[in-house]
Each structure stands twice: as structure tokens, then as C-alpha cells.
Amino acid sequence: MNFRFFFTMLPLQRSTAFKYIIFTFKIMDINKISFRVRYGETDQMGVVYHGNYAQYLEMGRVELLRGLGISYKALEESGIILPVISLTVNFKKSALYDDLITVVTNLKKIPSVKIEFDYMIFNEKKELLVEAHTILAFIDSKKNKPMRCPEDLLEKISEYLNSVKKQV
């Protein structure tokens, strides 16, 4: 099995603010996606427009779930949608045109009616550009009502989270 290193954040309380310790450990390469910033994603100064980061986060989220065998398309076909209900982004440094950036995505905890993701975006110099957090809700598309995470998804996500905990 091919393993690579990746970073995850664990909060450590110091006075009233949270500081983050970055741990490195081995895990399957399902939570990381790298790509080059395209010209159309930048402003006149070659800096990535802030609204594009939401798309980058979505790419990371979709690929993490795909790596777990969970397809957004299959979820939608089964009547489950996952709208973003909360998005928090903390910009540290700008991504620039033609930068090779890496989005590292992690599940925060076992989902219930909501599923939470943490993200970090790095450039090729391994400089932290962005820290972000999203919360999505499981919605029954026929009833347009919140629902619990389906059992088969819970199993896959629990297995993933347990493997991450064993690595730390």
C-alpha cells in the first residue's frame, strides 16, 4: 500500500485562544489533493480571488469522500444532499497564479445530522496559506428535511477516523 505523509491539526488551548500543533504521520493519500492555480482564478495582481477558496475546499472534501468510497453523485441519486451550512476561512498568505497548492482535508468527528471538515491549504514551499472549516447537513431531498448520516457512510467514516487515531 502506498503511504505518504500529511499534516493534521490538533487544537491545544493556550489562555483564551487556540494554537495548533502540526503533527506529521502516515495515512493513505486520500485526504490530499494538489493542483496548479489557474489564471482565471486570480485577480489582476495574480492573487487567487478569495471566493475561489470555497471551490478548493469542495474539491478536497469530494476527493476525501471519494477515497472512502463515498460518491456525491451516488448520494444525490439516493436522495441525499449535503449543503454547506457553515464556512469559516482564515487566510494566512495568498496563493498566486501558477502556484502548486495542496488542500489537506480531514473529517473532524463522526457525523450525525451534520458532517464537519477541517482543511489546510499549502503552497509548494509547504507554507500554510489557509485554514478552514465547513459544516454540511445531511438533507433528504424528497422531504427537504434534515436526516441522520446513512449507516453505510457512518461505517466508512468511522473506519477512517479510527485509522487516523491509531496513526497519531
Image (cartoon, helix red, strand yellow):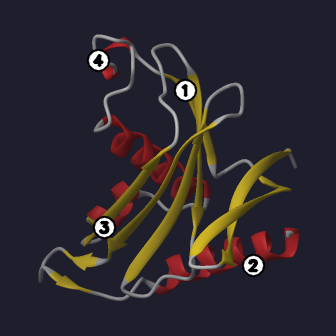
Q: Position of residue 153 (x, y in %)?
A: 51, 76
Q: CA distance from mark 2 to mark 4?
A: 41 Å
Residue furthest left in the image:
143
Q: Determine which quarter of the picture holds residue 52.
A: top left
SS of the residue under disc 3: strand
Other residues around mark 1 within 10 Å, as few (<14) / some (14–19) / many (≥20): few
Marks 4 and 1: in contact by CB < 8 Å? Answer: no
What's the amino acid at mark 3?
A: Ser
Q: Nearer the viewer, mark 1 or mark 3?
A: 3
Q: Residue at x 33, y 22 (%)?
A: 41
Which label number is shown at residue 118? none
Q: Of residues 142 and 10, which is closer to you in this image?
A: 10
Label 2 belongs to which residue? 162
SS of the residue under disc 1: strand
Q: Nearer the viewer, mark 3 or mark 4?
A: 4
Q: Position of residue 44 (x, y in %)?
A: 28, 11
The answer to which of marks 2 and 4 sits earlier in the sequence is 4
Which label number is shown at residue 43? 4
The answer to which of marks 3 and 2 sits earlier in the sequence is 3
Q: CA distance from mark 3 to mark 2?
A: 25 Å
Q: CA distance from mark 1 to mark 4?
A: 18 Å
The answer to which of marks 2 and 1 sits earlier in the sequence is 1
Marks 2 and 3: in contact by CB < 8 Å? Answer: no
The answer to which of marks 1 and 3 sits earlier in the sequence is 1
Label 3 belongs to which residue? 86
In the image, is 69 to the left or to the right of 136?
A: right
Tally of marks = 4
Q: Of residues 22 and 101, which is closer to you in this image?
A: 22
Other residues around mark 3 within 10 Å, as few (<14) / some (14–19) / many (≥20): few
